[in-house]
Amino acid sequence: GNSVTQMEGPVTLSEEAFLTINCTYTATGYPSLFWYVQYPGEGLQLLLKATKADDKGSNKGFEATYRKETTSFHLEKGSVQVSDSAVYFCALSDPLYSGSARQLTFGSGTQLTVLP
Amino acid sequence: ETGVTQTPRHLVMGMTNKKSLKCEQHLGHNAMYWYKQSAKKPLELMFVYNFKEQTENNSVPSRFSPECPNSSHLFLHLHTLQPEDSALYLCASSQAGRDHYEQYFGPGTRLTVT
């Protein structure tokens, strides 16, 4: 079946440090890939997405590139801020359910804390 | 109201109570989902509704009963819950039949079973 593996946290960085959160996946077809972010006390928000190989998703200074050859979708940001402290989830859409409501497969989440 | 809303935001209930969680989406989507998020565990998909029809029930105990009266509203009826059911319950919606299938989440209901 499909699966998503994220680096375990927690990750603690100083403000303006470089961030990488690793994500790899297994899927039988060609899934779409997503990063969601969950701030304390809130639901998940879509951060960025990529729908085919070599696509780069970007938003709010975060980037991730869909690497089919390594089945990876690592999240990066060049300079983190305290306000980026949150839990980050990598996810893929099940490619087998064409034309209907697809399930998302989520990673276990990575807690990021940015210190001033 | 915009996006996906959930009420109540917090709920404390005893094991013999009956309560309901409500979700409403204002995005014109036709698919809705219930997830359970427990501490230290991955997000668990509970139910999927596509065009008001339940298409997935991921082995959820019968003490959780979903209802989808129309494509904008989703309920989760709760009865005789256990303390281990305490968690954050998230509702999401998406536009089935469209590419990419990203889901939009509500803020969740924090449920505590005493």
Image (spheres, grey):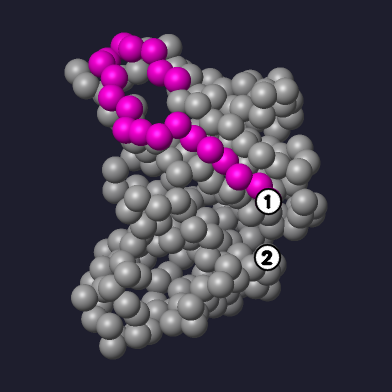
Quadrant assignment for the C terminus of chain B:
bottom left
Label 2, on which residue?
Answer: B50
Q: Quadrant of residue A111?
A: top left
The residue that appears at 54% across and 77% down in the rendered structure is: B67
Q: Which mark is residue A1?
A: 1
Residue kind at label 1, given as amino acid type: Gly
Crowding near the residue tagged with mark 1, few <14, some 14–19, many ≥20 C-alpha atoms within 10 Å: few
Residue A32: x %, y % from top left: 68, 37
Q: Is residue A106 left or right of residue B8?
A: right
Residue drawn at the location 62% of the way across and 21% of the way down: A65
In the rendering, at what x and y percent does residue A9 appear? 35, 33
Q: Which residue is at a point 62% across and 42% down the rendered structure image? A: A92
- Magenta-tinted stretch: A1-20
Q: In the image, is residue A54 part of the stretch drawn in magenta? A: no
Distance CA(mark 2)–CA(mark 1): 22 Å
Q: Is residue A95 visible?
A: yes
The picture quadrant where one finds residue B17 is: bottom left
* Quarter in which the N terminus of chain B is drawn: bottom left
Image point (25%, 77%), residue name:
B13
- A33 relative to B12, above or below: above
Is B30 situated left or right of B60 in this image? Answer: right
Q: Between tags 2 and 1, which lies in front?
A: 1
Q: Quadrant of residue B32?
A: bottom right
Of residues A74 and A60, the one drawn nearer to the viewer in this rendering? A74
Three-letter code, disc 2: Asn
**Given the image, what chain letter belongs to the residue carrying mark 1?**
A
Residue A15 inside the magenta-drawn segment: yes
Q: Report helix, strand or loop for mark 1.
A: loop
Percent position (x, y) of residue A53? 73, 25
Local packing at callout 2 (Cα closer than 10 Å; few below 14, some 14-19, many 20+) is many
